Image: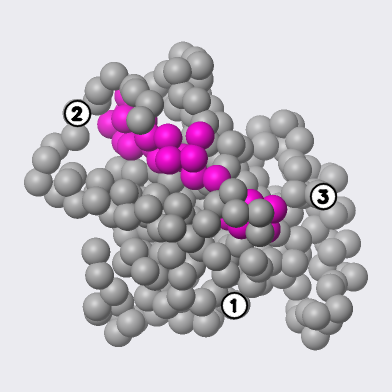
Amino acid sequence: MGNRGLANKRRPTSNDLPAWLKVLNEEVVACIRCPRLVVYREKIAREKRRAYVDWDYWGKPVPGFGDPDARVLILGLAPGAHGSNRTGRPFTGDSSGNFMYPVLYKTGFANQASATHRGDGLILKDAYITAAVRCAPPANKPTPEEIAACTRFLDREIDGLKNVKVVVALGRIGFDAYLNYLKRRGQISTKAPYVFAHAAKYTMPDGRLLLASYHPSNQNTNTGKLNERMFTEIFREAARSVKKTISTPRTPSTPGHS
């Protein structure tokens, strides 16, 4: 998968989104279901970080972003307090995004390597990014109840992204979020056979490939637990896998760990 042609593609607007996704995103942005998260995200937006004192923080739940026809779904944890909670777009304006978007560019899923703000020209091709939780949580740790509250959005989002063939789960919470989605949809009865580990790969009963990666957090990238080579290989595997589905119909297989 190459980058040629992406740079000249017209920048998508909200009018390019299918009706179901526009409605879903409007509901996400208006959500006030979790009092702790509402208080925190708005407090951060008021107080700001010194480096961003001139910014008008987003300070609301962050909707998903990317290609509605994507074959690759990237499922993360939650917005960063001074990243997505500031910019209003997943992995935009923080160190995790600075680590991830160059990899997406290198592997052909993005038209540029940088993500600084909405309207910066970033376009995703064949990839869509969402999160288990849509609001920035204190200490980057949502509660189980807060994760559960967001499932009504996640379920509709995954159901609507009809072309997804590969799910890249970033971190254990993203990994569990997809497994729990499959449980709610009656596709699996237990998560026990699916063990989280970096580069773990499972063919799921719904026919999709689940790839696991360490989350590109500061803690993981600064310590070397996750490096660029490791992360790039995850998305190269995703690109190889979706190319195979063009000519080879996918049939469900017994889940396995590789």
Amino acid carrying label 3: it is Pro
Residue 233 point in image, percent of width and height: 37, 53
Residue 180 point in image, percent of width and height: 53, 27
Amino acid carrying label 2: it is Thr
Residue that badge 2 annotates: 251
Residue 119 lies left or right of residue 15; in this view the side is right
Q: CA distance from mark 2 to mark 3?
A: 41 Å
User: Of the numbered discs in the image, which one, if any, rests on residue 50?
Assistant: none
Q: Nearer the viewer, residue 232 or 86?
A: 232
**Residues in magenta?**
197-221
Residue that badge 3 annotates: 138
How many C-alpha atoms fall within 10 Å of the one at disc 3: few (<14), some, or many (≥20)? some
Q: Quadrant where the N terminus lies?
A: bottom left
Residue 197 lies left or right of residue 164; in this view the side is right
Choose the circle earlier in sequence order: 1 or 2: 1
SS for tag 2?
A: loop
Up the image or down, 42 lies above or below 113; here it is above
Q: Residue at x 46, y 24 (%)?
A: 194
Q: Are marks 2 and 3 in contact (CB under 8 Å)?
A: no
Q: How is the image coloured?
A: one colour
User: Of the numbered discs in the image, which one, if any, rests on residue 116?
Assistant: 1
Up the image or down, 231 lies above or below 120; here it is above
